[in-house]
Image: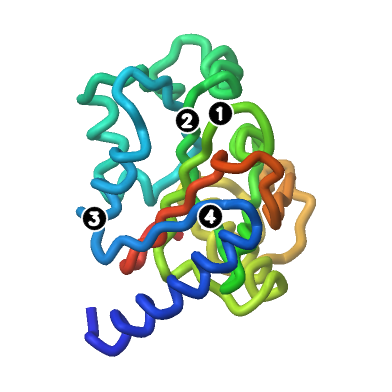
Amino acid sequence: MNENIYKRNELLAQKVIKGLKSRNMEGYYADSKESALKQALELIPEGSSIAMGGAMSAHEIGLVEALKNGNYNFIDRDKAEDKRAAMLAAYDADFFLASANAMTEDGVIVNIDGNSNRVSAIAQGPKKVIFIVGMNKICDDVDGAMKRARNVAAPINAQRFGLSTPCAKTGSCMNCKSPDTICCQFLITRFSRHEGRIHVILVNDSLGY
């Protein structure tokens, strides 16, 4: 990464962390994927039950592999015979892993979901939520974050899942009502009522979509 971009990200991350603190959420800065993995594992005690949504960023830093291979109760919905039961089990997990479709410089987190298991677990259920967020997800404000979520994250995810949505074909949001739409539920996390529940690890790298 260019040294100037690296330094800019480091300074911006401190602003985001300050914003998260004002919203009763904890923020951390990791200067690499390796540092992010180390920070995440420090937050999760061995023996914990862990669930997740489709957080590509958690995969990219090696966290999912580390948890599957470690002394943890990882609820793997992809391998579960009863996927609904696995999704429901996530609401009682010790930790829920997530990423953000976008974040604002002052600490507001924006997510869009199709099945809505991810955004519902972020909002309520698991004892703690850990977000892994690349600095590429940071936007000026909520309007910019919503635009990123709808015009960057959603089209790429629709293509990734092989869905037949207008955005998968055009690359940008068409505000559709397609049966395949993944823009069903919008979650804006602006404050956490429960102190110590939400933790955000900001990674000085480009992660996820």
Residue sitting at x 43%, y 14%: 80
Residue type at the position of mark 3: Ser
Residue hosting label 2: 95
Residue hosting label 1: 127
Which of marks 4 and 1 precedes in the sequence?
Answer: 4
Residue hosting label 4: 100
Dot 1 and dot 2 residues touching (CB under 8 Å) = yes
> Could you tell me how far apart the alpha carbons at marks 4 and 3 are, in whole angstroms?
19 Å
Residue type at the position of mark 4: Ala
Residue hosting label 3: 35
> Could you tell me how far apart the alpha carbons at marks 1 and 4 are, in whole angstroms?
18 Å
Residue 44 versus residue 114 in the image, above or below:
above
Residue sitting at x 44%, y 72%: 14
Dot 3 and dot 2 residues touching (CB under 8 Å) = no
Q: Is residue 91 visible?
A: yes
Tag 4 secondary structure = loop
167, 35: nearer the viewer: 35
